[in-house]
Amino acid sequence: SLDTKALKEKILQLKKERNAVILAHNYQIGDVQDIADFTGDSLELARKAANLDADVIVFCGVDFMAETAAILSPEKIVLLPAADANCPMAEMITAGELRVLKERFPDAGVVCYVNTSAEVKAESDICCTSSNAVKVVESLDAQQVIFVPDRNLGSYVARFTDKQIMPWEGFCFVHDRITPDDVITARERHPEAEVLVHPECRAEVVDLADYVYSTSGMINHVCRREKKEFIIGTEVGIIHRMEKDCPDKQCYPLSENAICITMKKTDLQKVYNSLESLTPIVTVPEDVADKARLAIQRMLDIK
Ligand code: 13P
Ligand code: SF4
């Protein structure tokens, strides 16, 4: 609509004035993805956030992503346009709970998914994302690995390593409620399609899939393959990227219910307001940030 177009132009103008860069996760609504400078998965966005020449980062995603950007770029203003955009999975483990676990298994390595608070990162040896979790676990000397908070990603990683993975019982409600029946029904509807799922899905769903990828891994796969049809087992917002990047392909959501409400809280108006007022700013206390940065940097150092 005209309003949307006008708002987009105002955002781009204000972005220049503020010397800001807009980062958007692959689950953001289409309009927000379209005004972003970079769209990507958690690892790509963390790498970007570490290497930006800008005064302001507008993070269109959820809180832990903006926190990671703030930890990596303490000299920049990091904005989270939707102040209440949290990740329920990240709230499933606290730093105190992780400390108790570390006391019980003092020789274990500690890997935390980036979907955690800065305090949990500060208690961890190294972070991982869905695209590098196996490599990260393999990079540790320890034979036992405390893996928090996602039990599904933990059990996925356990398939590819001889190390003993001890997963926490957290999960992503968006992926955890996808069922094997969803895969069977989708394959009946689209018998020619390949099934791609995210490793936050349950093991029994992973078992029925053709491929397992991070969100950007899925986009790359769809664009690269000669196949024309794909069933996409992750948050539905990602379909927008596929329609843009590879319009000749057909992508069907594995589940229409796979919607992350907090990822949808960011809209153009909030992005504009945020750039205008330079709020809400995301900050991490320096002592926590210094420790969390080590865990994040160790991850980024793995190629
Ligand atoms: P990736 O984009 O890194 O695969 O992460 C998925 C996710 O659930 C982020 O919250
Ligand atoms: Fe968290 Fe899942 Fe939403 Fe990602 S999709 S932000 S893991 S609740």
Image (cartoon, rainbow, N blue to C red):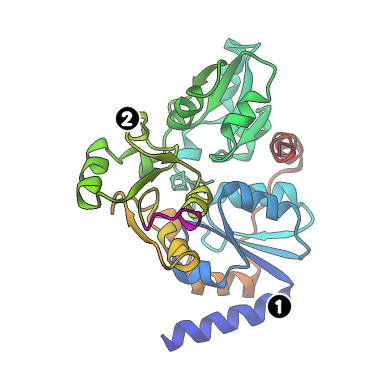
Q: Nearer the viewer, residue 83 or 138?
A: 138
Q: Earlier in the sequence, mark 2 or mark 1?
A: 1
- Residue at x-position 36% and y-position 33%: 202
Looking at the figure, which quarter contains the N terminus?
A: bottom left
Image: magenta residue range: 222-228
Which residue, given by chain and number where applicable, does mark 1 sit on?
16
Where in the figure is residue 291, as x and y percent of width and height? 74, 34
Where in the figure is residue 38, as x and y percent of width and height? 62, 63
Q: Hey, which quadrant is residue 276 in on the image?
A: bottom right
Amino acid type shown at disc 1: Lys
Q: Does residue 198 show up magenta in the picture?
A: no
Amino acid type shown at disc 2: Glu
Q: Nearer the viewer, residue 88 or 253?
A: 253
Which residue, given by chain and number where applicable, does mark 2 sit on?
204
Against 299, residue 240 (above or below) is below
Under circle 2, the secondary element is helix
The answer to whether residue 1 is left or right of residue 59 is: left
Under circle 1, the secondary element is helix
